[in-house]
Image (tube, rainbow, N blue to C red):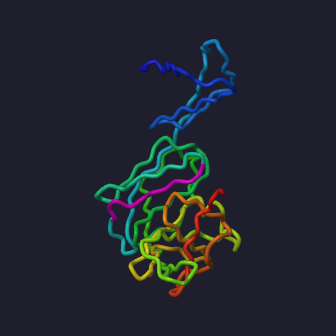
Amino acid sequence: DEEGRFTLPAVPGGSVQLLAIHPEHAFGTSERFTVAADSITGIEIHLREGASVSGTVVSGAGEAVPWATVRVSGSSRRKMISDENGSFAIKGLVREELRIYASTEEASSESLPLDLRSEAKVEGLEIRLDQEGIISGKVVNEDGEAVAEAQVQARLDFWEGGDVVEMQTRGSAFATSAGDGSFTVKGLTEGKYKMTATRSMAQQLGLDQGSAAKTGDLAVRVVLATPASIE
């Protein structure tokens, strides 16, 4: 409430730690405590001073890009959409070193390092969508037949030296295969990738699975992953 008090009913028994999130402050956690039969009072969660970052997403030509996805890595792990003028503002960030990145279906930016330990308010940041690399190819099943409407995912290849922080910041790029199985994933930075195809975005594959590709490859063959089953 307005005095910061809270009540959580029906908390399961056991060891518990509470997390509090506020749009203006960095997140905070409570000390770990044990829930038994009796009510527990006096739990405090201290929210730290939050940092903020604001700016504009622009194209490679310097024009504002509306509705771009902006991602922040680090403890805060935020994602938002720029407005109709390409502007964005993210508050309540942990004061730490992090990276920020923006993308659309057609292009992406480099991930930019920010150090919020000494500067709590960054304004006027320009994120330029100048990464326009592509990987294209065809999705097939295990019999070599074209597969339409498969979800194709391109992610930086960890096993080929992909930077872990960069992978966490950028996430994956996606495309949907056409009726003849063809696909094109756009907005990629230079690098080596693992390409996978699934029927559902919810299907998770290991980092070592998929077809190897690099930015600029135009004839990548991706075999549709067969869902695991339990018998």
In reply to whether residue 166 is colored magenta, the answer given is no
Residue 166 horizontal side relative to residue 110, left or right: right
Residue sticking out furthest to the left: 84
In the rendered image, the quadrant that contains the C terminus is bottom right
Q: Is residue 209 toward the left or the right of residue 24 in the image?
A: right
Q: Residue at x 60, y 14 (%)?
A: 41
Q: Quadrant of residue 20?
A: top right
Residues 96 and 159: in front is: 159
Count of labels shown? 0
Q: Which residues are magenta?
A: 65-74
Asked if 127 appears above or below 52 in the picture, the reply is below
In the rendering, at what x and y percent does residue 21 appear? Answer: 51, 35
Estimate the x, y position of residue 148 in percent, counting from the top left: 43, 75
Quadrant the N terminus occupies: top left
Q: Position of residue 92 (x, y in %)?
A: 49, 40
Q: Residue at x 49, y 79 (%)?
A: 133
The furthest residue to the top: 38
* Residue 155 vertical position relative to residue 55 in the rendered view, above or below: below
Overall secondary structure of the magenta section? loop
Along the line of sight, which residue is nearer the eye, 28 or 17? 17
Q: Residue furthest front?
A: 231
Question: Residue 83 in the image: x percent, y percent?
Answer: 32, 55
Residue ID at (55%, 21%): 10
- The residue located at (61%, 31%) in the rendering is 29
> Is the residue 103 above or below the residue 76 in the image?
below
Which one is nearer the viewer's eye here, 87 or 29? 29
